[in-house]
Image (cartoon, helix red, strand yellow):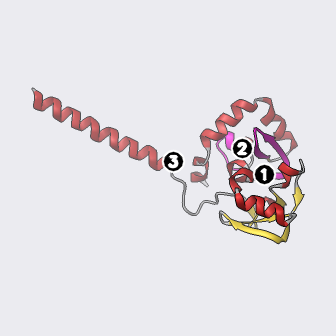
Amino acid sequence: MAKTHLIAFLHRVIVLSVLALGVGLAQTVRADAPMFQSSGGIALGGVDAVSYFTEGAPRLGSPAHSVMWKGAVWQFASRSNRERFEANPWAYAPQYGGYCAYGVSRGKTVKADPTVWELRDGKLYLIRDRTVRVLWENELPENIRAADAAWPAVLINE
């Protein structure tokens, strides 16, 4: 009788291990999937990511103050903004790779407009357009939870 229980136990362990491995693989992002949306290799269409936080508005960056990070060139309006970004890029980079936050909350990667944005709890969210921003804001906590849950798995289907 004990041998039967041991075999049943080992069978369950193997099945659960295989299922856990499958879930882990489902969460793996393709190596060639772009982590940050870019146009021609330039993140945020050349907008200075730090300017959202320091100036309260997107400001165009310059190739003279640029840095390569996560497969894209990030441009800044000043040397000090570039240095701030280099010191802690995750603090300034937009959520969900710069894709439309509302789109990610719906399980899709949609190009965002860097001039349609929101700062919430110290995080930068970009949105596709002003109409979609209204949808994003209507159920903001739920949309953030849904986008957090979907990211970065939405990149798998790209």
Residue at the extreme top: 1
What mark, if any, has residue 27 been given in the picture?
3
Q: Front-most of 20 and 118?
A: 118
According to the image, label 2 marks what residue?
103
Is residue 115 among what the camera can see?
Answer: no
What mark, if any, has residue 145 been given in the picture?
none
On the image, which quarter does residue 86 sit in? bottom right
Q: What element carries label 1?
A: loop
Name which residue lies at 76% across and 42% down: 122
Magenta span includes 78:
no
Name which residue lies at 83% across and 72% down: 63
According to the image, label 1 marks what residue?
112
**Left or right: 29 with respect to 101?**
left
On the image, which quarter does residue 80 sit in? bottom right
Structural distance between the alpha carbons of marks 2 and 1: 9 Å
Q: Earlier in the sequence, mark 3 or mark 1?
A: 3
Residue at the extreme bottom: 64
Q: Front-most of 139 and 119?
A: 119
Q: Front-most of 132 and 81?
A: 81
- Tell me residue 26's x, y (percent): 49, 47
Q: Earlier in the sequence, mark 2 or mark 1?
A: 2
Q: Do the residues labelled 2 and 1 touch (CB within 8 Å)?
A: yes
Q: Earlier in the sequence, mark 3 or mark 2?
A: 3
- Tell me residue 151's x, y (percent): 62, 45
How many neighbours does mark 3 have within 10 angstroms: few (below 14), some (14-19), or many (20 or more)? some
Structural distance between the alpha carbons of marks 3 and 1: 23 Å
From which residue to which does the magenta span run?
Answer: 104-126
- Tell me residue 110's x, y (percent): 73, 50
Q: Which amino acid does label 3 sit on?
A: Gln
Q: What residue type is labelled 2?
A: Gly
Is residue 126 among what the camera can see?
Answer: yes
**Left or right: 24 with respect to 140?**
left
